[in-house]
Image (cartoon, grey):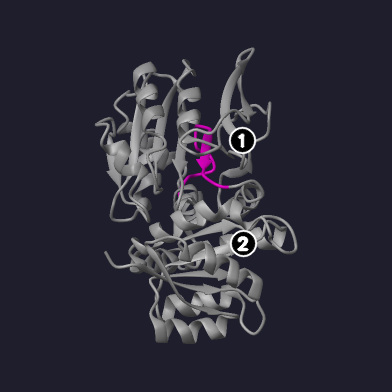
Amino acid sequence: MDKVKVLIVDDSAFMRKLISEFLAEESEMEVIGTARNGKDALEKIKALKPDVVTLDVEMPVMDGLQALNLIMNECPTPVVMLSSTTKLGTDNTFTAMSSGAFDFVAKPSGAISLDLHKIKKELYEKVIAASRTNVHKLRKNAINLERSPSLCEKSSKIGLGTLGKYRKNEKKWSDGNKKIIVIGTSTGGPRALQTVLTGLPGDIDAPILVVQHMPPGFTSSLAARLNSLCKIQVKEAEEGEMIQKGLAYIAPGGFHLKVRKVGMNWVVHLDQSELRNGHRPSVDVLFESASEMDDFSKIAVIMTGMGMDGSIGLKRLKQKGITKAIAESQETSIVFGMPKAAINTDLIDSIEDVEKIAKSIMSYC
């Protein structure tokens, strides 16, 4: 089996050396070069043709965002960003994801990251996954997002008349219950969430709970970014807040997102109990908690991501109440892990390209 050829781009000589040593320890990988800025990186990508690039955001001469756009246009290559947890760093990360980056790894805090070993396993797994992705799919998704600022405008035009048309197709599946939408995603998720949530109308008759695998410090920026693009309100979930229709609640990094009943209302409950499937937040935890909402019918959505998080929770949802389940198709998934595992349960009602998931959700709302 050929080794995965990696180019490491960082303005810090220390970081270049440390990341090179980490990846060189893995028998499946070969570090074929390093670059100190975006301009240097672009030249070396064209000359060395790496399978994957690790790219720092903040660099002199040409920063990571400028370099990423040129890479995706001139020599498309899967890119894993290395991102700081500062406000600027997290904002730049989501800009990079929209521009075609495969995924990101959060740098440990500190001026010089002597504790970078904490993210060694994550970096290795994401570089391997990036090497197996279709880079042209990444580029296509970036172009689609770039061309679709009007998605929000389109969603605002889905008024009551259109909702009425969707409801005629509903066939009373929900047995008259209120509805709640639960969404789980991982690698490639920020792009997928942008596509889906911008396709939902502001008057949607359901709350939305979202788990996106992401470390602490990034989910608030993700929620703010999506809120600025969507007709619905998108926010990072807070302990004890009442769940309301027309709002999307994103699980904070480092916390499981659950629900609990207080009087006649359901509220957000966050906890830091043990990891599930290696994750906190976990999709399984969200789905299992939502299965206890006896007075709601559920619409469950599982989108792009590594692993199989969500499949066990989907079984619980189907066992305990009325649930319609949607999985993202292989054709649009950046990583067809979580959707494939969900499809293999034989509990999925429809498999949709990411561009059609919002419409599929609305057919049940």
Is residue 213 something one can see in this rendering?
Answer: yes
Q: Which residues are magenta?
A: 199-214
Residue furthest to the top in view is: 263
Amino acid bearing label 1: Phe
In the picture, which quadrant includes the C terminus? top left
Q: Quadrant of residue 107?
A: bottom right
Q: Is 167 located above or below residue 198 in the figure?
A: above
Report the residue at 57% width, 53% height from top: 119
Q: Is 59 located above or below residue 218 in the figure?
A: below
Real-space Cα separation, disc 2 to disc 1, in angstroms:
20 Å
Q: Is 13 located above or below residue 26 in the figure?
A: below
Is residue 58 something one can see in this rendering?
Answer: no
Report the residue at 25% width, 36% height from top: 344
Callout 2: SS: strand
Residue furthest to the right in view is: 111
Mark seen at residue 255: 1
Amino acid bearing label 2: Ser
Callout 1: SS: loop
| Residue 213: image location, x then y, percent | 52, 44
| Residue 247: image location, x then y, percent | 58, 38
| Residue 214: image location, x then y, percent | 56, 47
Kindly report the secondary structure that dominates the magenta region of the rendered protein: loop
In the picture, which quadrant includes the N terminus? bottom left
Q: Dot 2 corresponds to which residue?
A: 83
Mark seen at residue 139: none
Confirm whether the magenta stretch covers residue 206: yes
Q: Is 308 located above or below residue 62 in the figure?
A: above
Confirm whether the magenta stretch covers residue 184: no
Q: Which of 213/55 is in front? A: 55
Report the residue at 37% width, 62% height from top: 28
Lower position in the chain sequence, tag 2 or tag 1:
2
